[in-house]
Image (cartoon, helix red, strand yellow):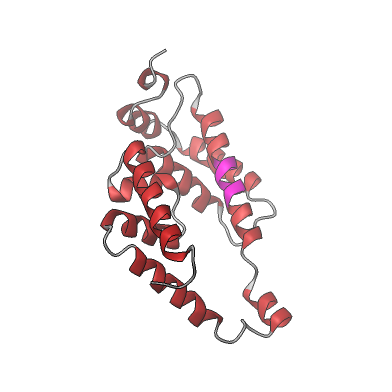
Amino acid sequence: MDQEAAYLSPAEVRRVLDRLSRADIVRLSLLARNWLRGLPGRSPDELVNEAMDRVLSGRRPWPCDLDWGAFFNGVMRSIADQWRKEDRRMPLAEDVGAEFDGPAPGLDLEVADLIGRMRHALIEDAPAREMFEYMLIDRDRDDIKSAIGMDETAFDTVRRRLFRHLRLAFVSGWKV
C-alpha cells in the first residue's frame, strides 16, 4: 500500500474534525481526564488541544483504518505518557533546595562556559550551530527538522558534523 494512502491528508483530517459534535468533544475530554489521572497540573482541555495540534500540524499522522475515537485515544495516551516521563525527569524546585541547599557554587558558570565553548566550536558551521541551539532547548528531531527546514538526510548530515566539530574541539581538553 502506498505510504501516503495509508494516512488521511490534512484536508481529510480537517473535514473529520469539523464534523465532530459537541458530544464527541465531551467524549474526548472524558478520555483525556482518564489519561491524566495521577498527572497533576494538566487539564483535559490542554491534552485535547495538544492532540489536535499534533494531528492538524501533521506531526501525528492519522492512519486511514482508525476511527477518530480510537485514534485520538491513542494520541492522548501517548502525550500523557510523554508528560509523565518529563515530570519524572525534572525534580521539583523545592525538593532540590531542601536536599542540596542549592546548586554547587559556580555550577551555572561552568555550564555557561561549556555552552559558550561549544558555540565557539560551531561558529563556522551555521546549520550545526542552529541545530545545537534547538538541542539546548530540548526540541525533538521532528521539531528541529521543521524549524530549520531540513529533510532526514540533511538533518543526519548536519548532526554528524555537529558532533564531529565538538569531538575535535574537546577530545584533548579545553583548546577552544
Question: Is residue 139 rendered to the left or right of residue 121?
Answer: right
**Which corner quadrant of the image does residue 94 belong to?**
bottom right
Q: Is residue 172 magenta?
A: no
| Residues in magenta, as a range | 76-82
Quadrant holding the N terminus: top left
Secondary structure predominantly adopted by residues drawn in magenta: helix
Residue 14, position in %: x, y? Answer: 34, 33
Quadrant holding the C terminus: bottom left
Residue 44 in the image: above or below residue 7: below
Q: Is residue 79 magenta?
A: yes
Q: How many marks?
A: 0
Question: Is residue 162 rendered to the left or right of residue 71?
Answer: left
Residue 170 in the image: above or below residue 72: below
Q: Nearer the viewer, residue 123 or 109?
A: 123
Residue farthest to the top? 1
Residue 104 in the image: above or below residue 1: below
Q: Nearer the viewer, residue 160 or 104?
A: 160
Q: Nearer the viewer, residue 108 or 25?
A: 108
Residue 22, position in %: x, y? Answer: 46, 39
Residue 46, position in %: x, y? Answer: 50, 53
Question: Is residue 86 rendered to the left or right of residue 5?
Answer: right
Identify the residue at image location x=44%, y=29%.
62
Identify the residue at image location x=47%, y=43%.
51
Identify the residue at image location x=42%, y=59%.
168
Residue farthest to the front? 172
Question: Is residue 99 rendered to the left or right of residue 27?
Answer: right
Residue 105, position in %: x, y? Answer: 59, 87
Identify the residue at image location x=57%, y=35%.
74
